[in-house]
Image: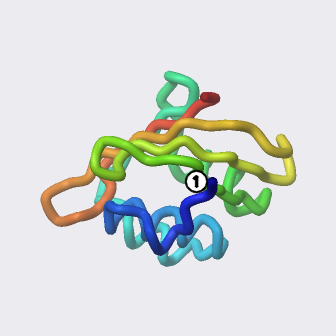
Amino acid sequence: MTIQPAKLSDPAVRAFVTAVNAHDRDAFMKVLAPGATMADDGSDRDLDEWTDREIFASHGHMEVDNESKGGRALVARYSNDTWGEMRTRWSFTVDPEGRIARFETGQA
């Protein structure tokens, strides 16, 4: 059963998923802390390059199947024009100001 983005527990993660699905780069960047980092399949990546390629240029979309760790860990069906759909895991580190300092993703 899919969890609607508006029902996700953590406000920063909710804003992240909403921005991804709306292809709203400005909203996406606002939810990230200055100097935010990310990893894909265990390897650190350049955040701007990765998000441009995997989310914005390829119409990324997240269908969240479940959440844990207070909403900071997700399992989602992620799709984009490059890879099609795959089952993915996402984990988020949120800073004291409520912005995402780091996210990690990979195949679930």
Picture layout, residue 108 above or below residue 63: above
Q: Residue furthest front?
A: 1
Residue type at tag 1: Val
Q: Position of residue 99 (x, y in %)?
A: 28, 62
Q: Could you tell me which residue is drawn at 41 percent across and 40 percent down?
A: 91
Q: Is residue 100 left or right of residue 84?
A: left
Instruction: Assign the C terminus to one quadrant of the image.
Output: top right
- Which residue has dot 1 on it? 64
Residue 58: quadrant of the picture: bottom right
Q: Nearer the viewer, residue 80 or 10?
A: 10
Q: Position of residue 16 (x, y in %)?
A: 47, 63
Q: Position of residue 21 (x, y in %)?
A: 64, 68
Q: Could you tell me which residue is drawn at 63 percent across and 54 percent down?
A: 1
Q: Residue furthest left?
A: 96
Dot 1 crowding, Cα within 10 Å, few <14, some 14–19, many 20+: many
| SS state under label 1 | strand
Q: Nearer the viewer, residue 7 or 42?
A: 7
Q: Could you tell me which residue is drawn at 80 percent across and 44 percent down?
A: 85
Q: Nearer the viewer, residue 69 or 49?
A: 69
Q: Is residue 71 left or right of residue 5?
A: left
Q: Position of residue 101 (x, y in %)?
A: 30, 50
Label tally: 1
Which color scheme does this rendered protein use?
rainbow
Q: Could you tell me which residue is drawn at 64 percent across and 75 percent down?
A: 22
Residue 29: quadrant of the picture: bottom left
Q: Is residue 81 left or right of residue 78?
A: right
